Amino acid sequence: LFRSIIETNLTEKFHPLIVVACALEAQLQRLMKRDSLVKEDALKRIESQLSSVEKAKHANFIINTDGEVANSIEQTKLIIDWLKRCRI
């Protein structure tokens, strides 16, 4: 099973760290649709991972994907602009 940068304690090797997060219900619905899972199996998979709240504690930036795709794109562009200005 895939483990994240945070779960493998590699956060110091990646800077800045960007976390993409959404509400649990959105995550659940997307996972069920993408992987053709029933709710119970999707919940088990989500619960086997660190929560978005825990991942966010390690992030320098968070992209919230609860809204429209255009909103996520705008958040991403703002981060890219900041990174370019800081030459990271």
Image: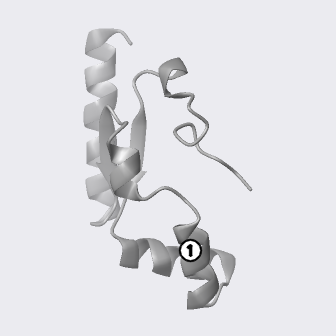
* Image position of 22 with respect to 72: above or below: below
Q: Please tell me which residue is depicted at 56% across the width and 43% down the height of the picture.
A: 7
Q: Is residue 14 above or below residue 30?
A: above
For this orientation, the residue located farthest to the right is 1
Which of 31/39 is in front? 39
Left or right: where does residue 71 sit relative to residue 9?
Answer: left
* Amino acid beneath label 1: Leu
Relative image position of residue 31 (x, y in whole percent): 56, 74
The residue that label 1 is drawn on is 31
Judged from this view, the residue extending furthest toward the top is: 87
Q: The N terminus appears in which quarter of the rendering? A: bottom right
Residue 53 locus on image (x, y percent): 33, 54
Quarter location, residue 49: bottom right
Q: Which quadrant does the C terminus fall into?
A: top left
Residue at figure coordinates x 38%, y 50% from the top left: 54
Closer to us: 62 or 8: 8
